Image (cartoon, rainbow, N blue to C red):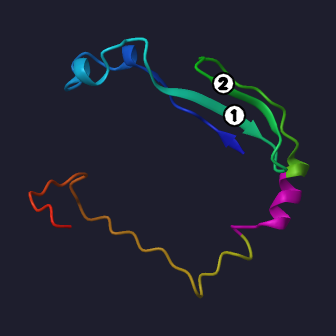
Amino acid sequence: MLGCGNLLKGSDIPASFPHKDSLYPDADEWVNPGDSVVIEPGGKVVAGPMHREAGILFHDIDPALARRAKRALDVAGHYARPDIFSLHVDNSPREPVSFSEDRSG
């Protein structure tokens, strides 16, 4: 498993961001500390996590480990059942956020 964490400090947010001064008053504050990591199929952490540090995470991956793990849980193979599962995507335009004064729900 490759976990790619987002590394972001208050100083990385543009000054033009609305309410930046009140939301992120400390430029050295970690908004997201990263935590990128590489984990073998058996669950062993083999690289990282890179916590509060920028860099490149390296690890040699053994494809045989992945093949063995895939045989145990093949989500793209025999578990893919188009006869009983389907995915419907509504791609009509939508607003990402809606606000309502109704507070009953």
Viewer-side residue, 87 vs 102? 102
Does residue 77 appear left or right of residue 5 in this picture? right
Query: In the picture shown, does residue 99 fall above or below 83?
Result: above
Viewer-side residue, 94 vs 51? 51
x and y, in percent, of residue 27 in the image: 37, 12
Q: Name the residue under label 2.
A: 50
The residue positioned 21% from the left and 54% from the top of the image is: 95
CA neighbours of label 1 inside 10 A, class few (<14), some (14 to 19), many (20+): many
Viewer-side residue, 67 vs 1? 1
The first of marks 1 and 2 along the sequence is 1
Is residue 74 inside the magenta stretch? yes
x and y, in percent, of residue 9 in the image: 44, 19
- Amino acid type of disc 2? Met
Tell me the magenta residue range: 66-76
The residue positioned 67% from the left and 21% from the top of the image is: 56
Does residue 91 appear left or right of residue 104 in this picture? right
- Amino acid type of disc 1? Val
Dividing the picture into quadrants, the one containing residue 102 is bottom left
Dividing the picture into quadrants, the one containing residue 92 is bottom left
Q: Which disc number belongs to residue 37?
A: 1
Is there CB contact under 8 Å for labels 1 and 2?
Answer: yes
x and y, in percent, of residue 67 in the image: 86, 57
Query: In the picture shown, does residue 96 fall above or below 23?
Result: below
Does residue 97 appear left or right of residue 69 in this picture? left
Dividing the picture into quadrants, the one containing residue 47 is top right
Quadrant location of the C terminus in the rendered image: bottom left
CA neighbours of label 2 inside 10 A, class few (<14), some (14 to 19), many (20+): some
Quadrant location of the N terminus in the rendered image: top right
Magenta span: predominant SS is helix
Is residue 12 inside the magenta stretch? no
